[in-house]
Image: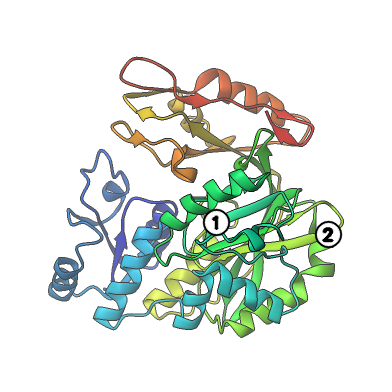
Amino acid sequence: MKKLLLLGNNCHVDELIKEAKNRGVYTIVTDNLPVEQSPFKAMADEAWDISVVDYDVLEKKCKEEGVNAILCGASEVCIKANKELCERLNLPFYANQKAWDITNDKLAFKKACIECGLPVPQEFVLDIDLKAEDLAKITYPVVVKPTDSCSSIGLHICQNEAELIEGYKDAYEKSESKQVVVEAFVAGEQVGFIYAVVNGKPHLNAAGDDCACKDDAERRVFGASPTKHMKLYDEKLKAGVDKLFELLEIKAGTAGIQAITDGENIAILEMNYRLPGGKFPGEKLICDVMLDNALAEDTNPQPAPMNGQLFSYAIWLKPGKIAEVKGLDVFQARPQEFNVQPFRQVGDVVEENSGMRQVFGYIMFFTDLAHHGEYIDLINNTLQVLDENGQDLVCRYRFEKGYAV
């Protein structure tokens, strides 16, 4: 019997366990948390209390236990651990080094897009010296972000020179490589495209629209799938995306591309070569392709058409320590209407200006456009995330004229 080690308690691990068990694979989940804080451990055949970054211990344990494959969900820390352990143990890892390097470097990825004829935002030249002549050439607003960050850490939308200087210094400090991107801010709606690579060919598996907070464009709150911009995608992106996958030599796994559009023009923002950060109706396919690669199997998973309307609500939190969560069970008890995906747990400390790490989780609901407001109201009136003083940390939003307010 094959043995699959899953790293951490992150998004998609539950689906990976379920599909692996359907194949007759023995499943193990490891992290340094008790089962109460890592509930996917209870789903697996076995659980280890070893941190995912304790590489030496995990390498030894995998050899002793005869682990054949290693996977993880949507966690940057776990993905790095996944790659490291696969290399140490000579096990399959879905990402080739070229694609891994380019998709984890925003500047290199942008150059790859240009080479493939894909539209990207205008870039401005600036370094940590913040020279007056370079600053004078910049047209506002601009986006500033580290080339190697994730979860919107160090990302700033700057309206003037003072904001740019402050944002650049912050992005520089949060970049491991000390490289920062400064590019034109493109107003519009963000669109996400998720691909499953089946037998070496990319297939568009899901596509959805994001809605930002009206007062903070960095904060994405609501989402809807499928996207209403497929015609624009087919006309302006599809051919270039196919070239991009070929250039990156991507033969396995799953990837997501973020773009932004005003309804007429569209530009590529970034690419994540990993499982996406949220659940969606096409989750089974991307888990199947990841399992095929890790287990050296070929189940020939079949891409399906994008059907059904799905909405999502990202629950953003104010800074504080989570002491109690109320109301989540209401949605968990209605699986035909809601899909609940919490990231944060009791005991977690939420820090200010920590990007997507301020998101408690996602609540997804299946309805039509005419009724989605009723579901948003229900979530706002039901869910509470309380701190140690009984104060509610939830930032509540409503949908209004294309924005979250």
- Please say if 300 is above or below 358: below
Kindly tell me whether residue 37 is visible in this rendering: yes
Q: Give me the residue at 31% from left, 24% from top.
A: 323
Q: Real-space Cα distance between discs 1 and 2?
A: 22 Å
Query: What amino acid is found at the position of numbered circle 1 in the picture?
Result: Lys
217 is higher (above) or lower (below) than 380? below
Element under disc 2? loop
**Residue designated by label 1:** 145
Left or right: 167 as drawn, with respect to 184:
left
- Which residue ends up furthest to the top in the rendered image? 390
Residue 97 place in picture, x, y as percent = 44, 81
**Which residue lies most toward the front here?**
132
Q: Quadrant of the N terminus?
A: bottom left
Q: Say if residue 279 shows up in the picture.
A: no
Where is residue 224 shown, x and y percent of the image?
Answer: 69, 44
Q: Residue at x 31, y 76 (%)?
A: 86
307 up-or-down from 67: above or below: above
The three-letter amino acid code for the residue at tag 2 is: Asn
The quadrant where residue 219 appears: top right
- Residue, x 72% and y 64% (percent of image)? 122
Between 175 and 193, the one lying in front of the other is 175
Quarter of the figure that contains the C terminus: top right
**Residue at which label 2 appears:** 265
Q: Quadrant of residue 393?
A: top left
For residue 340, above or below residue 325: below
User: In the rendered view, does 311 fall on the left or right side of 234?
Assistant: left
In front: 105, or 180? 180
- Side of 86 where 210 appears, left or right: right
Mark 1 or mark 2: which comes first in sequence?
A: 1
Position in image of residue 62 (x %, y %):
19, 71
Nearest to the observer: residue 8 or residue 304: 8
Q: Across the whole image, how many numbered discs are drawn on residues? A: 2
